[in-house]
Image: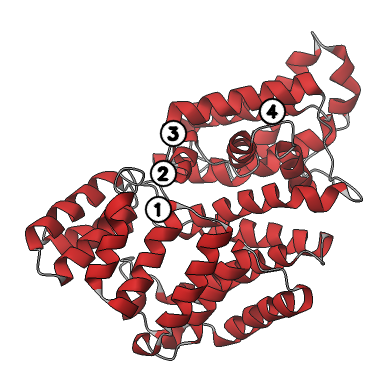
Amino acid sequence: MTGGVSQEVLARVVREHAGRLAASLVSLLGDFSAAEDLVQDAVETALRRWPAEGVPERPDAWLFTVARRRGLDVLRRESNYRAKLARLTWPAPAAPDDRLRLIFTCCHPALSRAAQIALTLRVVCGLSTAQIAAAFLVPESTVAQRITRAKRKIGEAGIPYRIPAGEELPRRVGEVLAVIYLLFNEGYLSSTAERAQARDLVDDAEWLAALLANLVPREPEVAGLLALIRLHRARGAARFDAQGHLVLLADQDRGLWDRQAIEQATALLTRAARGHRRPGPYQLQAAIVACHAEAATFAETDWAQILVLYDMLLHLAPSPVTRLHRAVALRHVKGPEAALAELADLGEVLERYPLFHATRAELLRELGRREQARRADERALELTANPAQQALLEQRLGWD
């Protein structure tokens, strides 16, 4: 045991192992609700005991042991699980697509889209309801209700634990892509105060996207999402300075970018686009990131091309967040006044989205409207829990 650990470390260790444990238990038990109950019981026990006893040397095995003991207690009342639980050992037998199978189960068409994503992020990826609520821009209580109803629905409808086959598979890929995309976003810039980024979640997202790409090689949007993740990762070394402060794109040292990885991801995107000629939101987002990645300097960025890509993206998948990002491109093509006008009717729908206020503050400051810019930065600071974003905003406000 290693004692003296912070709540942040405990939460991270639990999250890293809970998703893997859940996938293994669902695979072995074939009962979604029972597996989820066992994992939750093990997690609650860990969070109660580890602060006093320290994190065990093998936290994954520790969690599994607690879950197994809890399962055996349940078996005293429900004997039909006895034979299956008796076979359990740790580490569980290797099954590289366990989590992908679990994602497809969580993303079953019998569940609403919002419930699919919330349940997958909670059960498979180990995100808290607060993190999921931040990703959806909805209250935490709403997310909790969605998860509870989804779990009940899986049990009542007898939804199978499997990857769909044949013609069913391509129809269900979209929901899985949405989950992987949100998982990547949470890892790229965390919505919680625990850490600025979560590289393990980014690793998970890339792994799942690559696994899905092997499963459905003729689906260009899967390749698009994989390229998008890899393009972002290729620039990862320049996103934070030595003190952990966020470095904006304009100020990043492009010598730290992984040029080979950028070329490989761009080639993947090009093959998908030319081979299938079915553009989609993930391919377009990857193309936008590729435009940034291929520019030798910030000044040489092809903003006109990026604006065209955002227009195409809005046509295919309109959303207020995409309009916000398009406004940034518009600023570099037509100036800050045009960009600020673009944001004018987004205030209500993005009122609780910190990037909206931070972007608006930048535009207001550029137009010399400093008092309005300060209030917008203060509102952004109120809304974000990410420590790197907080530090950047405090620096702007002169509070650091």
Badge 3 marks a residue whose secondary structure is helix
- The residue closer to the viewer here, 120 or 89, is 120
Assess disc 3: are there few (<14), some (14-19) or many (≥20) residues with their C-alpha within 10 Å of its C-alpha.
Answer: some
Tell me residue 138's x, y (percent).
Answer: 43, 36
Tell me residue 182's x, y (percent).
Answer: 55, 51
Tally of numbered tags = 4
Q: What residue type is labelled 3?
A: Pro
Residue under pointer 4: 67
Query: Which of disc 2 and disc 4 is earlier in sequence?
Result: 2
Cα separation, mark 2 vs mark 1, equals: 8 Å
Q: Is residue 392 above or below residue 242?
A: above
- Left or right position of 207 against 254: right
Query: Which of disc 1 and disc 2 is earlier in sequence?
Result: 2
Assess disc 1: are there few (<14), some (14-19) or many (≥20) residues with their C-alpha within 10 Å of its C-alpha.
Answer: some
Query: Which of disc 3 and disc 4 is earlier in sequence?
Result: 3
Q: What residue type is labelled 1?
A: Arg
Residue under pointer 3: 51
- Left or right position of 108 against 135: right
Residue under pointer 1: 195
